Image (spheres, rainbow, N blue to C red):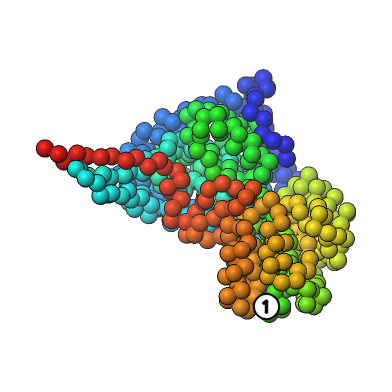
């Protein structure tokens, strides 16, 4: 993906036009969505700025009630949102229901924050010293196409709870659930301008979040290359920034692990959402003494992984999100040493690929080093703990990962040694909304979720009150 261009072509000031939204399972047009131009983006930001004064003044208990109301309205529309995501993103219906439910849960969780966003009283001589968390103002949230609903909620829920207003840009190809969530927010009683969704090009809407002085923070999830461009742009105004970027996470399997369990779990860790997941365990490191055994156990698990019409309850993996993404991943597969593949949908016009296991020729092989963002997992042996840690860390990324072992001490040693923000022992669970999430190295900057997320959407103000006569 090209670096973000922060200059605006003259066409950005004219009508934004429309974008055809495609169903990835069928390659057919679902609908056309209006794309905001620069003037429309500015107008939305200015409305959010005007709404900020009233929203920050809403009593904490009332702001909490409105967020709970929003969560309740989302709950009432879980099925609608889920089926919309199946059609727009190709997510399996089981995953899409979880994703819509996650928006509800995140809103409920952060509805407790307005009444608990505590400052501190700090002992000082000659008076009283207290701190306050002050909202920033307008927050611009840029959401990727791989998880449109959850990642939107991870940004807007704590931002709103902290007293900010939000303008949110969904990905051009997956805008439908975000647009519906904006409608549901109004239905729940949030005032106009507090939460706005603006579909449009990243080079127009996203870039304007970076350059507009009324946007006080940008929260971006997407590629590392584009994130670097946003970071450079935000530096001009010393604008607050959260980045959740790429990943090339390792699944480390020691000889003492339950190999059957590890092999059965590996496809879900690598191929969930067709591998279009920054937390995907796309590199598997297996201790050399059990390497061949593990590969033999993994093959039937991969072939059993159900790739089918995402509307089917039994589907474990749907299509790639677009023809462009499918073709990019296919090029990596064509150049790799493929060990075996799973099943896929044939005779369909959708964007389908099979789950694929590859054997990298070396640690320099692109399938081992680069984030493919598709249903491809590379498997490599390692010697011992030190070798496993070195190979896991031999990447510019550090977002997630897993460690399979029966030795608790080893699990903790390796977890402390791996440079990654989110690790799981004997599982592939990366994200819980009540725990922090974010990456090391070029996987990002800052943390989302967890009890401290509202702090990243506020400034600390210190006030000293003299008690001297």
Residue 120 visible in the current orientation: yes
Q: Quadrant of the N terminus?
A: top right
Residue appearing at x 65%, y 72% in the figure: 404
Q: Position of residue 456 (x, y in %)?
A: 46, 46
Residue neighbourhood size for the residue with mark 1, other residues' Cα within 10 Å, grouped as few (<14), some (14–19), many (≥20): some
Residue 199 visible in the current orientation: no
Residue appearing at x 64%, y 57% in the figure: 279
Tell me which corner region of the image, top left, top right, bottom left or bottom right, holds residue 7: top right
Residue appearing at x 66%, y 39% in the figure: 226
Secondary structure under the numbered disc 1 in the rendered image? loop
Compared with 427, 137 (above or below) is: above
Residue appearing at x 83%, y 63% in the figure: 359
Q: Is residue 143 left or right of residue 105?
A: right
Q: Nearer the viewer, residue 204 or 227?
A: 227
Tell me which corner region of the image, top left, top right, bottom left or bottom right, holds residue 430: bottom right
Q: Quadrant of the C terminus?
A: top left
Q: Position of residue 123 (x, y in %)?
A: 25, 49
Tell me which corner region of the image, top left, top right, bottom left or bottom right, holds residue 173: top right
How many marks can you see?
1
Q: Is residue 125 left or right of residue 11?
A: left
Compared with 35, 132 (above or below) is: below
Q: Which residue is mark 1?
A: 257
């Amino acid at each position: 993906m090209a670096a973000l261009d922060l200059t605006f072509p003259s066409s950005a000031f004219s009508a934004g036009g429309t974008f055809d939204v495609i169903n990835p399972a069928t390659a057919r047009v679902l609908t056309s969505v209006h794309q905001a131009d620069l003037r429309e983006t500015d107008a939305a930001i200015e409305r959010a700025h005007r709404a900020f004064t009233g929203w920050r003044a809403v009593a904490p208990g009332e702001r909490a009630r409105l967020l709970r109301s929003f969560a309740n309205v989302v709950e009432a529309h879980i099925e609608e949102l889920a089926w919309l995501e199946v059609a727009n993103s190709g997510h399996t219906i089981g995953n899409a229901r979880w994703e819509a439910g996650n928006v509800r849960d995140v809103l409920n969780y952060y509805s407790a924050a307005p009444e608990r966003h505590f400052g501190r009283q700090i002992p000082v001589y000659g008076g009283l010293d207290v701190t306050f968390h002050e909202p920033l103002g307008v927050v611009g949230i840029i959401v990727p196409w791989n998880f449109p609903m959850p990642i939107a909620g991870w940004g807007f829920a704590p931002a709103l709870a902290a007293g900010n207003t939000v303008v949110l840009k969904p990905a051009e190809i997956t805008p439908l659930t975000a647009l519906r969530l904006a409608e549901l927010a109004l239905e729940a009683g949030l005032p106009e301008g507090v939460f706005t969704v603006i579909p449009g090009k990243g080079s127009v809407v996203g870039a304007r979040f970076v350059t507009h002085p009324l946007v006080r923070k940008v929260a971006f999830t997407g590629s590392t290359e584009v994130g670097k461009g946003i970071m450079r742009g935000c530096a001009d105004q010393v604008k607050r920034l959260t980045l959740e970027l790429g990943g090339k996470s390792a699944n480390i399997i020691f000889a003492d692990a339950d190999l059957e369990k590890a092999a059965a779990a590996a496809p879900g860790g690598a191929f969930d959402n067709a591998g279009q997941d920054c937390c995907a365990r796309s590199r598997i490191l297996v201790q050399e003494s059990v390497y061949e055994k593990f590969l033999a156990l993994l093959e039937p698990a991969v072939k059993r992984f159900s790739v089918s019409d995402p509307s089917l309850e039994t589907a474990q993996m749907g299509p790639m999100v677009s023809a462009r993404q499918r073709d990019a991943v296919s090029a990596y597969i064509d150049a790799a040493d493929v060990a075996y593949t799973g099943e896929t949908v044939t005779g369909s016009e959708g964007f389908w690929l099979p789950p694929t296991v590859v054997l990298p020729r070396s640690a320099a092989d692109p399938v081992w080093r680069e984030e493919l963002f598709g249903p491809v997992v590379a498997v490599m042996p390692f010697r011992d703990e030190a070798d496993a840690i070195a190979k896991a860390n031999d990447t510019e990324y550090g977002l997630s990962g897993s460690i399979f072992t029966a030795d608790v001490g080893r699990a903790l040693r390796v977890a402390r040694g791996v440079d990654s923000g989110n690790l799981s022992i004997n599982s592939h669970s990366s994200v819980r909304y009540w725990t922090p999430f974010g990456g090391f190295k070029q996987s990002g900057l800052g943390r989302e979720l967890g009890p401290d997320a509202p702090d990243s959407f506020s400034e600390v103000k210190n006030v000293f009150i003299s008690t001297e006569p």
